[in-house]
Amino acid sequence: MDKKRVALLLIFGIIFASVGLISAGWWSDLFSGDDEGLEGELPASFDVGVQMTNQAPTITSWTVPAASPTACTTTALGNFVVTVTDPDGGADLVDGVVTLRLNNTHATLGEQFRPATPVTCVAGTPVGNTLAFTCSGINMNFWDDAGTGDPWFVTVTATDGTNAATNSPRTSNSSSGNYPHFIYTSSMIIQVRDSNDPTDWTGGDDTITWTDIQTTSSDAIPTNNLITRNCGNAAVTTTSITGKKLDSTTTSTDICPHSFSVRAAASPCNVGAVLNWPAAAKAIASSSLAVYTTAEVTRPFYFCLEDINNPTFPTDTCVDPITVGTYNSVGNPWDITFA
């Protein structure tokens, strides 16, 4: 090897060695865990944030009140109570909104809602993950459909103020359980008055009166008649009347109820159903009463004194012959029965 080449290699070796000696600290920093040289490049502390998602509630159950019609007017229902559960806690439901409404399909009037718009229920006090809402202010008509065979469906909506319940809206599915229908009680409520009292349906003092009757009278029409009306939500199919003897106020004689007949039309007088005595009540033809829909449902009953001296039946029931005087059923009123 010539001198020139040896000298060049020596120079490069010296230079490399010098760099190594001069930068010894740099090499040790590179391979050590000391981060002193990074000071100021990363923060000494930092924040951590976690975003929680609001969870939707669930309509858990509700209860329904018992109710019956009020004669010829509306009935204010008791409280419905809706229970809602929220996995985020019952307090999360305090600013929630719960509504409730009833619906039913009427055979004549079509779909009916009670009320027309849903009621907004009032929140109670949270208990654990649940909150009960009280729903009130619902009125029923006296003629609204009734019975287990014709239930009112309950529809409930619920939110926690942000999210709708997982099962909202929820509609009733049975007559019991957690989501029951509302069952309106079926009631036959019939009121009676005589035609002398055009507005008095509840007085209970109705009287059918004959005047100027002779001991030989027949086919005599009274001065007034009876009128019945349906104030409930159950139809009347048959009306029966039980007649009883009319006692003389001065003698021991009687007018037997077999002397009277009743029908649901004004005339003629002598073609009605002759009253039994002392057998069971006599059913009157064409005496049904439908349930109200858009107009009051009434039925008149007309009486006829067909034969004041009609032979008694049986023979030992009434005492005749009829004498001049007054006869009445005071203390022994006639009965009218609806079925």
Image (cartoon, rainbow, N blue to C red):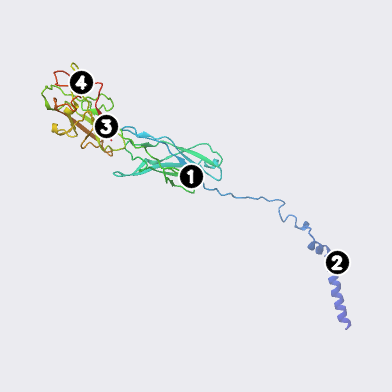
Q: Quadrant of the C terminus?
A: top left
Q: Nearer the viewer, residue 272 or 99?
A: 272
User: Which labelled disc corresponds to residue 337?
Assistant: 3
For residue 191, what is the image quadrant? top left
Determine contact: label 4, label 1, CB under 8 Å: no
Q: Earlier in the sequence, mark 4 or mark 3?
A: 4
Picture coordinates of residue 131 (x, y %)?
Answer: 52, 40
Find the distance from the CA under tag 2 to the CA under tag 3: 126 Å
Residue under pointer 4:
247
Find the distance from the CA under tag 4 to the CA under tag 1: 68 Å
Q: Earlier in the sequence, mark 4 or mark 2?
A: 2
Please tell me how crowded label 4 is: few (under 14), some (14-19), or many (20+) other residues with Cα within 10 Å. many
Find the distance from the CA under tag 1 to the CA under tag 2: 79 Å
SS label for mark 3: strand
Left/right placement of residue 100 relative to residue 3 reads left
In the image, which is nearer the foreground, mark 1 or mark 2? 1
Q: Earlier in the sequence, mark 1 or mark 3?
A: 1
Q: Identity of the amino acid at label 4?
A: Asp
In the image, which is nearer the foreground, mark 4 or mark 1? 4
Find the distance from the CA under tag 4 to the CA under tag 2: 146 Å
Q: Identity of the amino acid at label 3?
A: Thr
Q: Earlier in the sequence, mark 1 or mark 2?
A: 2
Picture coordinates of residue 314 (x, y %)?
Answer: 19, 27
Q: Identity of the amino acid at label 1?
A: Ile
